[in-house]
Image (spheres, helix red, strand yellow):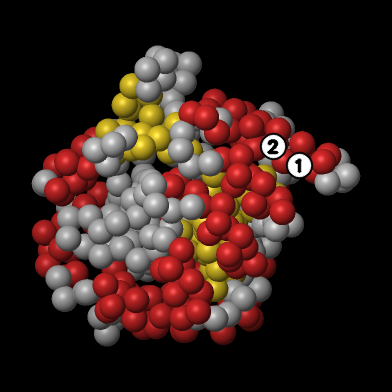
Amino acid sequence: MKMTFRWYGKGNDQISLADIRQIPGVTGIVWALHDKMPGEIWEVSEIAAVKKQLDEYGFHMDVVESVNVHDDIKIGLPSRDRYIENYKQTLRNLAPFGVKVVTYNFMPIFDWTRTDLFHPVGDGSTALYYEKEKIQQDYKEMAHYILENLHGLTFPGWEPERMAKLDELFEKYRPVTKEKLWENLKYFLDALMPTCHETGIRMAIHMDDPPWDIFGIPRLLVDKASIHRFLKMVDDPYNCLCLCSGSLGADPANDVPDIIRSCYQRIAFAHIRNVKHFPNGDFSEASHRDCDGDTGILEIMRAYHDCGFEGYIRPDHGRHLWGEGPGTVRPGYGLYDRALGIMYMWGCWDMLEREAGKG
Ligand code: DNO
């Protein structure tokens, strides 16, 4: 596996590349142009500027997370073709810089969704938390809360320009049933696949987070059956997954190691995260240590190892530790707990390698 770390860019992330270089075994940065609106072309000069920064520290830029998909593509409006052309051009601009995987999601309106970004874990740290009850209520209040806690930093999927027009967006999505959304996803991928073959870039869809419909809007990539429907729908080796253990793991019915074993050839990128469930349907994010949550991190690492996984991997979210808090850290993306998560993953991996006679 190739260990990576997500970084939001100079001036947009409190963590420096110099800090990241000190985490053992991290070879690449998972990056994006975070000031781009969905649908805009990423220009060569802008990509080159990031490459220069990463080169200074010897990091590769093989994985982009995310090139966000314009709402018109998800809704299926006639204007989608223009935005798909822009997406293809972005892929063509990325390829010469060595980019091999582009992560994206097809969640309508909201990306990942939580109701508390700094929830006390009980040991003095805080973590992202989802309270089921609150997601039945006012979507504007929730969006406002999330934007407030980003303290002016950009967060993909939570663009203030889009969030300012939430009622309009909900209205536009009204005719988009779950089946329509599947069709629109297929249309998008069918159009992109030739460019993926031409550029060598694999498209890796992120799981829906949480893995169920929210505020009455449909979500697609939620369990084993929907993942297999997706892979079959566009049965192409360039149509891949960003398999997020935490997103799937939010639903206790999902057996994440089993899902990994069933589709590992198409997993281009793995997100590792642990989730703790509560009986009322709430969940909290937890440390990567297996026993701190219910996702089964040890068996997940074993599944990847058994499958001979050679793709990219990163710790997903972490708790906020040792002085990290509102205003000093991007929610879920502090330095310390993600670095601890990496060491846990290496611990599992190195032991599995040793046992297999390779380490
Ligand atoms: C959450 C992330 C997601 C992911 C996007 C991919 O922290 O895992 O925001 O980057 O859904 O497009």
Label 2 to label 1: alpha-carbon separation: 6 Å
Badge 1 marks a residue whose secondary structure is helix
Q: Is residue 135 left or right of residue 63?
A: left
Question: Residue 39 occupies which quadrant of the picture?
Answer: bottom left
Confirm whether residue 135 shows in the render.
Answer: yes
Q: Nearer the viewer, residue 224 or 7?
A: 224
Residue holding disc 2: 348
Looking at the picture, does residue 347 appear above or below residue 61? Answer: above
Dot 2 falls on a residue whose secondary structure is helix
Label 1, on which residue? Answer: 352
The numbered mark at residue 102 is none
**Residue type indicated by callout 1:** Leu
Residue beneath the point at 38% across and 76% down: 185
Residue 89 vs 330, above or below: the answer is below
Instruction: Determine whether 92 is above or below 15 in the image.
Output: below
Q: Which kind of residue does numbered mark 2 sit on?
A: Cys
